[in-house]
Image: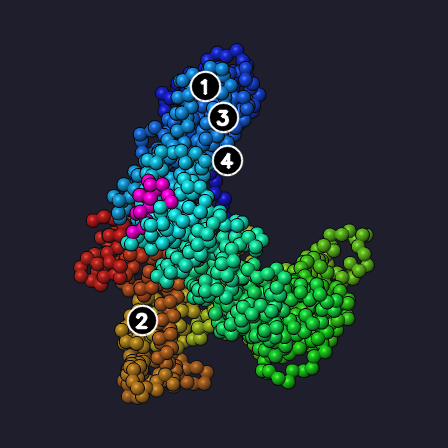
Amino acid sequence: MVVKKKTTKVEAVALDEDKLCQLIASLSVDVDADGVKHLAQTLQTCLQLTDAVQQIQLIKKAGSQLEALSEEDGGEALDACLNALSLIYTSVQAKNPLRRAAASALSSVPQCLQGRAADSLSSCLSDCLSSPSSEQHPHTIDTIASCLDGFHLGERCINKLLLQGLFEKFKEFEEFSLCRLNFIKVSLCFVFIVLKFICEVLHKYLQQNSGLAGRHIAQAQLMQSCLAAVKTSMLVLQRSEGAIGAAPPESLGGLLSCYIHILTDEEFIQAVQSTAGMAVVLLIRSVMGAGDEVASVVSSLLRGAAPGLDSAPRWLQLRCEALCTSGRPPGVALYLSHGALAMLSWKGSLPGPQWEELLLLVPETLLDLDVSVKESSTAMVVARVLTLWSGAALDCLQEETGLCPPSLQVALRGDSKLQHHLLEHIYSHWEHPLDGVRHQTRSLFHNLLLLHRRTKPADSDSASDPYVAELTRSLLGLEWHMRGKYGSLGCLVELYGAEHLLAVQPRLPSLLLDLMGDQTLAPYASDLLERLFVSHKAQLSGRESDWMELWHRIWVNPLLDVLCHTRPDQTTYILDYFLPKLLRCSPSSLAHMVHALQGARPCRTGPSSSRGALGALMTCLRAARAQGLTAASEESLWGGLVPLSLLRQALVHKHDQVRMDALGLVCESHRSTKVLTSQEMDLIRHFLPPNLNSQSPGVRQQTVSLMKKLLCRVKDSSQLLQKRPVQERRAEDQRSLDQYRAFLRWLCGTLLEVLLPGASFSKCLLSLSLLNLLSQLFSFTAEPATFALGEVVTPAHAQNVLNCVASNFLEVKQLATSLLSQLPPSAVGLQVPETMLSVLRAALDLSTSTKPYDSVTAAHLLHLLLQQPDLIPVLLRCDPGLDLQIRPEASRSLILELNALAVVRLLLRRLQAELSGAEASLLQAAASFPLYGRAHCITAVLQRLSTECLSQTEQWTGLVSELIAMCYRMSDVVSPVVQSSSPEGLIPMDTDSETSGGLQRILQEIQPRDSNDFFNSARELEKPEGDDRSQAQTQRTPPPNADGEGYRVTAQMVLVCCWRSMKEVAMLLGQLCQTLPLHYSNENEPTHPGLITEEQRQVNLVGLLDRWARSVTPEVEPEEIMGEDIPDIMLSPVTMPEACTALFNGYTDGNLRRGKALNRLCPARHRSGLGSGGRQPPNGDCCCHFYPR
């Protein structure tokens, strides 16, 4: 998936017209200094432009010009330039690249001119702060935050660094006037002006929030603005922490009140409340410092007890009392705990006992809160804060253990009461639905283990730790379906090594491998296994020299045992997750696997469907090949470690997966241009003949896929060899090409020999698939420059492939038809008129068969004939009455069009004659010439035709009109049976009185009865004895067959004839509607109600309207395409909504033709029953969805 990178929108500087004119005028002052003059001209040009990219380039140029200025270049012009840059910085949005460019230019000011630049920027910031418009408040907040985000000059304008710099500057003067002292005092309060402004903005936001109940979009925007304001106030407090103590209580108290209001108002989202909790702790720390009193105040706030606030200033106590009420929301303690952990420093030794008390109070508060948490989002915050607490506790223990108070060490030890409660929290949350909660729980468990280890002496033996041993035993004793158990065991492996777990449970590898059969547990078990064998390998390799044998015995041998004795379907996840990781960890273990499996005895235990040692060997080798660890050209592997005899045995193994693994081992390669060895080709010769008759669809698919990889290697490598000049080819290159030629010819011949009459479906399907694959990658030609596969194909082979077209299976028909079009024409012989005539007659005979699949065979035969240039003379021999033109010289596309036109005319002519017979006797039609076969062949011929560039438009127009009329006639013939409410359908009274007696007997037996045996035997339509009219109508009676028997007609034959004919009518109309160009004809067609069924009517009408609505040609109007016929024929109460939807699919602005069509559809809905109490559509009136009443 390609994710488009989000680009920042660049907007040009937009100033008021008056302000812009004044600014440009101030830059137009004549200056003697060339540097300032060029700078002013650059900025003047920048302000006059409207393209943001060009403005950025000019501002960068102005920054380089500023660097070249000196202290002597000062004056009003320089102040105007600095003012222009400051105004650009404060006027654009925070994420606009123009702001970054302006900040970079202002930072380029020389040190001697930094003060003047700070004055200009401070003036612009003051103007922003004094703006009365509340709409500008979010922009001003963003501007303040940008000044404090790595912009040194912006920080000087807000914090006390600027004030100290100004004081040092004025101190150098001998005369220190009172006015300058007053200026410094005013400047010293600038940072408090910023805080006061933020406080006022937050007050306004809080007032607005109370009136936005129910307005979710406006409330969400307000939440984002509140979050930005609180974060900006925190930045100001952090940058000016040293001067906050001298701030007036009013401004800080108002800010603290806003924070407390956000904390206690549950209408605010968690992100804002969590940030407000951090801001409260930060403000307290900024006012009171980092002593023991801060921890005391924060602890009192967590407990909700006011007596602990005595050490705080009076104004701070009064504001914090709102957090110490009994009715405060439970989330207050959570957010204050987060603030205490994030805003207070916990590294190193703690300042006093109150800090130790606060550190232990936080988890107790969170665990008490965790009991009542029901929302997943709050549970996520609790889990994250607990993990943050464990990190803070680790920070306290990072220094020497002696600096940590003993009481704190005891409280944080593994066997303490606090750790016990935290473990209970972990056990209850490691199966939480939220992945984030599970991740935080695992991190908390890891940190708790680290806390326990750091509270122990450095020289203590972790292996003999009773707490860790008991914890390990308790975890291993839990049920393995608990997913959190695996992550906790992984933490133990990471800290104490795999040997610790193996000492407690030696059978741990086998237990985990048994769990790999469960899809839900396989990822967790494989991850734990990887941690274990990687850790164990590191432990053994660092201690012993001959460690490999022990490691193989523990980790590799259980794997081989499972692969040998377990059913292949239960080892899927072992092969997907575990085996590749094991081979990546230790590639040299492949040799051990090969030796162990070659020397293994035949499997006497386990299910009979297990793959055995040979199958396990093939599996391991194929996995190693996928990891790039083996190659077929390595003689040490194929000729040494793995004898070819084993591969030959595996290729004909009784288990499918073993054969596929062995075939994959031969066919797969990381390089598609790697030359095949003679051994590999011999192995394919050994594999293919006995495996062509595989009954498993999955095996057949894998065989085709793997053989495709092999043949692609043959093609790519042969092309690489053939590109070399003949004189530069080595002997082995030519030998490889000769071997390829012999191999491909053998493969082609073997596959063609299989396609004998009576071959099984699986053998035909696999052989035809591989032959089609050969035709795609190589051509069946006799050219000497290629492999000349066409020389292998004989007429007998082509005849066998042609016989496959008559198969009962559609896949075999399609593959055989596709292959015949690729075989050499001389072998197929369809260009011979007699052969072509025999195939045509066979197709025409099959198109009237009572077996439905015969009509599909006829369609495929006609498809083969459409490609022949001399088809039209053969059609005239078959039916001399056809009016066809022969064009000896025509293009391939024109030949196809003319042949399709001729074939459709022939089929339509035959079908019209048969329709006349069906109108006289439906029973005789069902028995001798079902209508659906011809219609199916017509549809199939039209599907092969490209209708975008038809040249014989007039002939097609007339032919399509005849086809539509024929569809109407077919619908009239079969609709009484199809539209009958009886389950079997109703056969109407036949006009032939001679067969009416037999028809009545069928009608009686076709009614559903419990003891009805009609469907188990055929009925012969015999002439009733004593019928006086039988002699007069003998000419209308169909002749008996060659055996003298009359027609044998069953109810199923009649029903199949009618229903399949109706289906083919719908398919043919749908093909005409969706593919042929739209041309309107003024011929008035009669109304045909009930043309097709509901689903077919809906699909065809919707397809027709959708094509018309999307068309861009204006020659066809809705009044023409939707005259009186279409609504009456195809519209119904159910179809009307879908028709309207089709008109609106792909709607484009300005396309008003859909409106015209809807106006045409609205009156039609009354005729279809919507306006006269008829059946209502499922979704109501269709027009009300698109137009207001």
Q: Nearer the viewer, residue 927 or 798?
A: 798
Establish if 1042 lies above or below 581.
below
The residue at which mark 1 appears reads as 80
The residue at which mark 2 appears reads as 978
Type of secondary structure dominating the magenta stretch: helix
Q: Residue at x 58, y 74 (%)?
A: 505
For mark 1, give the secondary structure: helix
For this view, does 161 lie left or right of residue 736?
A: left
The residue at which mark 3 appears reads as 165
Query: What range of the chain is rendered magenta?
Result: 311-325
For this view, does 546 lie left or right of residue 620?
A: right
| Category of crowding for the residue at label 1, using alpha-carbon neighbours closer than 10 angstroms: few (below 14), some (14–19), many (at least 20) | many
Mark 1 or 2 closer to N-term? 1
> Label 1 amino acid?
Ala
Establish if 1006 lies above or below 204.
below
Quarter location, residue 1034? bottom left
For mark 2, give the secondary structure: helix
For this view, does 1018 lie left or right of residue 843?
A: left
> Label 4 amino acid?
Gly
The residue at which mark 4 appears reads as 150
